[in-house]
Amino acid sequence: MGTIEAALRDNAYSPIDILTVGEAMLEFAASDRGREGWQLRVGGDTINVATYLARLGWNV
């Protein structure tokens, strides 16, 4: 599995658009009724990768 830098270097995409990056995950969170329960949420990888790419100078 390559790194983000390798993927960007190997592909000549500039600028790039990120629609979705990350994965669905189960998260322990309070429900609307104030009780705790499992809810399906989107992971935090999307914002982390977008921030990382922006710091490298890519348009995200």
Image: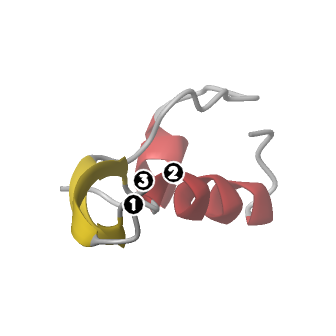
> What amino acid type is highlighted by mark number 2?
Thr
In the figure, residue 12 lies in which quadrant? Answer: top right
- Label 3: which secondary element: helix
Viewer-side label of 3, 1: 1
Instruction: Tell me if 33 is positioned left or right of 46 in this view.
Output: left
Per the image, the residue denoted by label 2 is 46
User: What residue appears at the point 43 percent right and 56 percent down from the top-left corner?
Assistant: 32
Say whether marks 1 and 2 touch (CB < 8 Å): no
Residue 54 position in % (x across, y down): 76, 56
User: What residue appears at the point 26 percent right and 46 percent down from the top-left corner?
Assistant: 24
What numbered label is drawn on residue 8?
Answer: none
In the figure, residue 48 lies in which quadrant? Answer: bottom right
What numbered label is drawn on residue 6?
Answer: 3
Q: In the rendered image, which quarter contains the N terminus?
A: bottom left
Per the image, the residue denoted by label 1 is 33
Q: In the rendered image, which quarter contains the C terminus?
A: top right
Q: Earlier in the sequence, mark 1 or mark 2?
A: 1
